[in-house]
Image (spheres, helix red, strand yellow):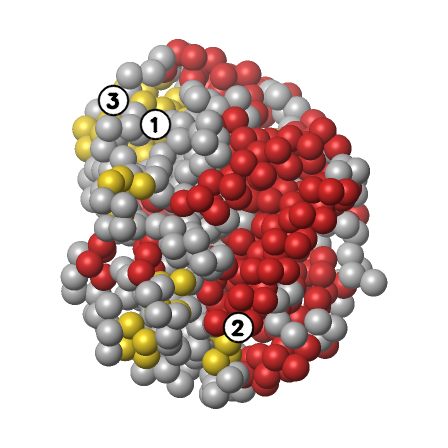
Amino acid sequence: MKKLILFFLITKLFAAQQLIVSDPYLTFKAKQNDPLYTTYTAAMERSRLYGDKGYKMDYYSEHLPINYSGDQAGKFYCVWKVDQVVVMNTGEFYEKPVVTSSFPDMMIMEYSPFKGIKVQETFFVYSSSIALVNLQIKNIDNIDHNIELYPVLELGNDSLFIKDYDKLHNGYITEHHESKYRLISSLYKNAPYPTETRDYFAASFFPYSFGGFHKSLEDFYITIKTDFYAEKRNDSLNHKKEGLVNFISLHGKFSLKTGEEVNVRYFRGWQDQKEDLHKLVEEIERLKTEPLQKYVDANVKLFSQIPRIKFKTQDEKLVYLGAFNLARGCFYPPAEKTNYNFYVFSRQPLWGWGHGHQVLHESLSMLAYVYLDPKSAENSQRVYMEQQREDGLIAYRHGPRDLQDYPHISKELNKDMSTTSAPFFSWINWEVYKVSKDKRFLSDAYNSGEKYIKWLINNRDLDKDGLYEWGPYGIIENVRDWYNAVFQVSAERHLDVDKEDISDELECVDLTFMMIKEMHSLSQMAKELGMKDASHAWGKIADLTSELVNQKMWDDSSKFYYSINKKDHSFKYLTRDLRRMEIIGFLALWAEVAPKDRAEQLVKHLLDPKKFWRKYGVPTLAADDPWYTPYVDYCCKWNGPVWLLWDYMVLDGLKKYGYNKIANQLADKMLLAVTTQLKKNHNYWESYSPDNEVLNSPPNYIWDSIMARVLIEKYKK
């Protein structure tokens, strides 16, 4: 009885007010089947590269409670009981959840689990180690209600080991194992990712009881409901303090009179078992009474610079805001060998390749991210400048573990050559500057970009004919690191990587277009910096290279651009015809290489539904090619799947040639691909099927944030 009285006293202290998002533009009403992105990670300043946990929110599965799951770390949620009526899942709610705001690290929603009980639930990933749920509960009924809450941490398979129950702070201490194995790409085995981890599960209230359980959530219903007519009716959990379980639960009781409200929080702490538990507990104790409004206000400030587009539909607005959330949620503060903030491809879920370093083709996401945080976008690009090699190389990867250039033997030079990335560097920097207007950044970027392009000229045109070939590890350099109809020798990729890839034996049309784009970008940057001679020089080299492309790489019979054999500049490689229509042919528009009449021919191919004009965007390979497949059954496929960044380059090229209506139609196809998935599973995806709705590729990939840029372009006046 004393515990219950104490609990009432404590809960009454925390009758905090509802959280308010002061900017109406950042509010909406997203129901369970709306295209809301629902993955959350800690703010950059409270994040770390290792020992970091993000969460996916599921508010849309009606057979489950509102829950938050972390990669290999289970999920946590709350079961309600109102006046002895157990409300297990959202399908039973009196009013279903509606999300009203969503930011990179937090979400605010409203619902009624029971008639007369109104709840504002806020999920907040405070740091890499701590996430919390804040429940602002109000009785809006004309009668009093008794409420019991059961916050649950569930891992399943009897894999959650209870170490102890902390009576002083009312928290469960458990442990579990997390494997470094991943289906797509396992975590780096020598990197300090925690595998033996600790959980700390606590609440802001004094628990009436607590317990650990082996059975299912359905069995838990029987435990907390109990038989009304039973002789030994028990309203307490089992107070288990050790052993393996499927899940643990805290149990709180309180009553609300008409018009009364109360604030309740529960916390999931997570850390490496080698870390200091006491520090984690102290931080959670502080957060039990910490006002959360300041964190909401910080998010409003973060989003204060984005263009205020008047969208025609809420779907577009949700994609727009979600794209910014995706990009920001992938960022970490400076660490180890970089002095600048950097991104990973994905923080939740966590997978090895996606948790590597920055790569230039992923950095195309800065074209969108710059509208949210120009300085952070600049700093991400400065990671490359900071680690650029003295000879000008920007390697394949850069980040906290420094430059990574993956040397491979060049057959032509008979020595190791460094691997770079698809060269989008100066184009990105120029686009970032056009938003940030930071002349110092532009000057530094120009100097770095000039050194880089000179390295490329020296190392990616070994025969000095003015056209460019990928390096000996071209299969990752050219981004086509799985299936590709031109650079890949066998249809099934049954040989090893080096034997499959022939991109260093061709004059490659994609790389040549990229080089032209880099030259044009340097020309524009030099002009902005008042360097007229340099601007003219880069423009002249770009024009000469464009002339070569039009002489050598255009096939007049099929009206398309292709890569050619390095030795004889033919469209043949041994017995193979290199004239396979790929999306890269349309980069002639993006790089402004195609004369007007050839641009018209390219657009005809683009609009052919039997080739490229598919339901969900422009595929990487023409649909009438024998190697084409619409199936996204793994990562990295370039024989059909839609990659949003490359579709954006097609869209950008269309606008440069005045095809604005077609560009907007392409934007709508891309939007349809994204909204279809977000409505189904609330994820962004590495790639999309041009024809189908089912995907098996890595989710929540940073470069899908380009959709914010697509929408800005669509509504630009």
Q: Which secondary structure, mark 3? A: strand
Q: Disc 3 or 2, which lies upstream in sequence?
A: 3
For badge 2, the amino acid type reads Gln
For badge 3, the amino acid type reads Lys
Disc sitting over residue 163 in the figure: 3
Position of residue 361 measured from the top left corner of the image (x, y, whole percent) = 49, 50
Mark 2 near mark 1, Cβ–Cβ under 8 Å? no
Disc sitting over residue 686 in the figure: none
Circle 2 sits on which residue?
Answer: 551
Q: Disc 2 or 1, which lies upstream in sequence?
A: 1
Q: Quadrant of residue 198?
A: top left
Q: CA distance from mark 3 to mark 2?
A: 72 Å
Q: Disc 3 or 1, which lies upstream in sequence?
A: 3
Q: How many dots with numbers?
A: 3
Farthest residue, direction right: 717
Residue at point 24%, 28% (across, down): 190
Q: Is residue 220 visible?
A: yes
